[in-house]
Structure formats: structure tokens, C-alpha cells
Amino acid sequence: MNNLAYYNGTYMPKSEVKISPDDRGFLFGDGVYEVIICYHGLPFYFEEHLKRLEYSLKEARINFYRSHEILDIISVLLRMNGLDNSDSTAYIQITRGVCERKHHFPDNTVTPTVYITVNPFYLNPSYITDGIKTATIQDVRWNRCDIKSVNLLANVLAQQEAFDKGANEGIFVKNGIITEGTHTSVFGIRKGVVFTHPAGNQILPSITRLIIFDLCIKLNIPIFEIPIKIEEISTFDELFLAGTTREITPVVQLDEYIIGKGTPGPITQILYNAFQNLVNEKKLLFI
Amino acid sequence: MNNLAYYNGTYMPKSEVKISPDDRGFLFGDGVYEVIICYHGLPFYFEEHLKRLEYSLKEARINFYRSHEILDIISVLLRMNGLDNSDSTAYIQITRGVCERKHHFPDNTVTPTVYITVNPFYLNPSYITDGIKTATIQDVRWNRCDIKSVNLLANVLAQQEAFDKGANEGIFVKNGIITEGTHTSVFGIRKGVVFTHPAGNQILPSITRLIIFDLCIKLNIPIFEIPIKIEEISTFDELFLAGTTREITPVVQLDEYIIGKGTPGPITQILYNAFQNLVNEKKLLFI
């Protein structure tokens, strides 16, 4: 079945979406995006994703005033694509619009390009049961990683480098400190305490990270925004990645170093189960 | 007249070029580009631009084996667009191709997207005669500025910030040091000596920068790859920007600081004239 997408006000087969070569998304990566998971047809933590999208738009200075329409568009796309009763992801990309190439912003007559699609979601269950291998990658990204922009060449190169090393994901290291994964947040656990990089312009404010903070508080698991030094990695008992399409994925290896016993650790599993309970609670509301 | 462009093997009106929303250029800014000036229909320093393009492709790990075709494509486009006897710029963008969204590289069946256009070149003569105002902008870009990629959001935001400050271009400052302009190289002159940021991963290896080194040697003007500290800016007598579409543009103001006498300086003018002689020599070959 041809995937039906939303493009600038119209629902159409994705194959018919025609991006202009003058779209600033194509010429400059001048756009922002979001990926929202829809469990059983319900966008999960939608308000938080919308808030983050609006933050990215504000920081990238893209004037887009129709973000209130996004939820309805996703709902329509899920229905049109027969995904309203299963798990899927919604992808939303907003660029500064179409204009003859020049670095500075176009005038006010240029309206942003809006492109939204939905796709079936699948997470390999062995990643959760067995954990994954990761590889450290030098973090050469810009200093505004808090903006979820489509300037993702560094992430692309890092993810490929990780794959080339036989790892499932790359973990960025900057000045000896773990910042985040190539498309996830990174958490370490030492003596029952959870550590992760502080929010700020070096990492993306992950929605799953937010959920993990809530879960830790609820479960009485101490959690601190203290960065993990790569030289201290051997002192950590557990490591996991968190993100919209990763959920909570245990890490059992970083480069040559085996984390803990080389199997998913107990606190990671507690958090994973609590996360799944949260997902199931939300699903139940709609069954 | 509708601009005729080259897109993936075909010459067509630019308005008919249809970029897929799955193009990695659109989704990730996963592509590189070049801008080549064609004086009197002749691509200027074409081999150097081609070499830089191939460097960018190599560093971005994009497998593109048809760069030897680019000169012919530009020649055809210049003729088709009636620009073969005037000054124009050729824009070349190569992305990693079209593939369902995932961070790591697509398989080998995916071929790069190639998009090339030509456009009339115009440089406001008052910029050369009067000089321009510039503004310092914090350099938050990634640490691979030597790759001419389309991940240009930082440059877009910087150029707009400069415009908002009433300046014509932004000058990036990182850790108190001038790296380069938002789309140019920066040169300062103190007591007859030319200074510019060393090559490396903090700046783009500008072709005009290369030409300036050659001209300085020819003209016995000392030139050093020594970075300019922003706190020492008052000790500089002249400042200029260099780039393909800027040629050699004098800077008469940086933020509130007036450079030299507030008019284009003598060494900048000597270099500008030498540059124009070089352009005219190349033009003469084809008249």
C-alpha cells in the first residue's frame, strides 16, 4: 500500500510529494523535526513533543503558527494508513520554506514547508532481552544540540561509524564525557543511582528522558543530572539508552568494555517494566 | 525564462525538479555542495573546486564516481540558460540519495542525488568601493567545517543575526578567535602583514583564500596562517572577506569598531586589483 502523507495542507501518496530543490530543508537543512510514537493509535506524550517542537521552531526562528493542527493531521494519517489500532511512529518535519538560495531568512511571504508521515513501529525484542553493543564516537556536533534540527550529518556519520564497528548505536563522547547517543539519551547506573548528562545545549531534551526522571522519582530510584566520564565507565553496573523509538534499551557493551555482567541489569529492567506499564495504562484508556 | 537545471542525469526546468521527501538531503542535510563562479562563461579555478568537492564527498563518505562529468554539465547549463557569455555561478549539490529514513547509510543500490543549476552573478559594486559592515557572531558550528556540507543552519542563523544587527555579513568568533565569515574567509592586515585562520577543521578550505595566498606571494606581501584574536582587532589596519561570490570585499566596520580609516585599505585594494587582473587574464583566453 502506498503510504499516505501530509504535505503543505494536502493528504497525498508519499510518492507524489514533491519537495522543491529551493526548499531550505534541502539546501541548508534549515528545518526542525519530531518523531512521536503512537501506541495503539494514540500519540504518546504528545503535548511534550509539541512543546519541544515549538521550542525547536522558536530557537531556529521559524515562524510556524499551525502546530495546533498537528494532532488532527496525525490522527487522520493513522486512520488513512490503517495504523489507528497498532503501534506506529509519526514523523513531522517543518522547514523554513521555499525561496531562491540565500543564507539569511526569506521575507514574510514565504511560509514553512510542513511534511508529516506515519509508519509502523517495530523494535527488535532481542534488543530488550539481550541488550545491545555500542561504540564511543567523538562528539563533533554543534553547540545547539537542544534544537531538534535536520542538520544531522554528524549523527549520520556517527551511527554509520558505530555500525562499522559492529555496534548497534554510537555513544557520543565530548571532552571525555558521554553526552548522548546518536539518536538516544544515555543513562548509567552505579550502586543503585542513575546518572545522565545535564540538560542544556549539548544534548536534546529527550521526552523519554523526562519520563525516566518521573519513573525514578515514583520508584524511589535516585537519579542525578551528573555527566558520565568515559574513564569511569568500569565503575558503572548498568548502562541503557532511552528514546522514542528505543524506549529503554539495555547496553551490555561499550567498545571492548562489558557492562556489568554482560546482560541487562536489574534497575534497567525495573525501569523498562515501569515504562511498559505506563504505555499499557495509556493504551487501556482507548480500548 | 524558466531556469534549466540538471537533476539526476536529465536537463529540465528547475520548476519540474522533484526532490523526494525521502532524499537524505531533505531529511538529514546529508549532502555536500559547491558554488563555482563562471566569469564570461568560464568556470574559474574549476579544478580546485572539483578537488574540494571530492574532499567533501570523501569526508562525508558519499560514494559519487561521476564528478568528471560536472564540467560538461555546467557548460551545457550555461549555454541552455544563455549565460555562456556573461558572469554566473554554478551551484552543485550531491546528497547521499533517496532511502527510507534511518540514520546509517543506505545500501549500495542507492545512488547519490545530483542537482546542478546556474544563475547570473551580481556583486553590488558599492561593497567593493565603500566596504561593508560586519558583526561578530558566536561560532557554535560543528568541528568539521572543512566539509562543505548542506548542514548550514548555524550559518543561516548567524547570517540573519548579522542582518538583524545592520551588518552585511557575520564573522564567527570561537574562544575569542575569528574563524571565518558566515560564507567567506576573513583576512586581517597589520603593519603590512596579512593574517588569517589556519586551515583545519574549524574553517572551510576556501578557493579564494588559496588564490589570495598565491597573490600575496607574487606581490611580496607577507601572509601568515595565524588566527586573529578579537581582543586585538583594534591593532589591525585592514580587514577583508574573501569567497567565491564575495571575491575580495573590504570590511570597514566590525560591530561598533571602525577598521582603519573606515574606508577600504590600500593592501586590500592591491589584492582586489590583482584578483581582477587574474579574472581578466582568464577571460581574455576565451575572447
Image: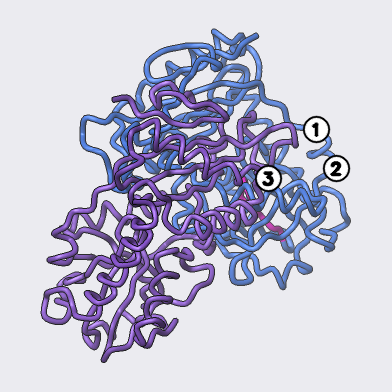
Chain colours: A purple, B blue
Marks 1/3: CA distance?
A: 33 Å
Q: Are marks 2 and 3 on the same chain?
A: no
| Label 3 sits on residue | A63
Q: Which residues are magenta?
A: B181-189
Decide if residue B282 is on the left or right side of residue B274: left
**Up-down relation of residue B214 to residue B195 (above or below):** above
Q: Residue at x 44, y 55 (%)?
A: B144
Placement of B117 over or under B204, stated as above or below? above
Q: Residue B94 has which mark?
A: none
Q: Secondary structure at mark 3?
A: loop
Crowd tier of the residue under label 3, counting other residues whose Cα lies within 10 Å: few below 14, some 14–19, many 20 or above: some
- Specify few, some or many for label 2: CA neighbours under 10 Å numbering under 14, 14-19, or 20 or more: some
Amino acid type of disc 2?
Asp
- How packed mark 1 is, by other alpha carbons closer than 10 Å (few <14, some 14-19, many 20 or more), is few
Q: Nearer the viewer, residue B131 or A148?
A: A148
Please give the name of the residue rendered at 13% of the width and 59% of the height, measured from the top-left corner: A126
Query: Do the dots labelled 2 and 1 sit on one chain?
Result: yes
Mark earlier in primary sequence (2, 1): 1
Residue under mark 2: which chain is it in? B
Cα distance between the residues tagged 2 and 1: 8 Å
A161 relative position to B256: left or right? left
Query: Is residue B210 something that shows in the picture?
Result: no
Q: Nearer the viewer, mark 2 or mark 3?
A: 3
Residue wearing tag 2:
B130
| Residue displayed at 53% across by 71% down | A200
Q: Is residue B187 visible?
A: yes
Residue type highlighted by circle 1: Pro
- Rendered-image quadrant of the C terminus of chain B: top right
Comparing A49 with A132, the one in front is A49
- What residue is pinned by disc 1? B125
Magenta stretch holds residue B183: yes
Q: Position of residue A237 (x, y in %)?
A: 21, 84
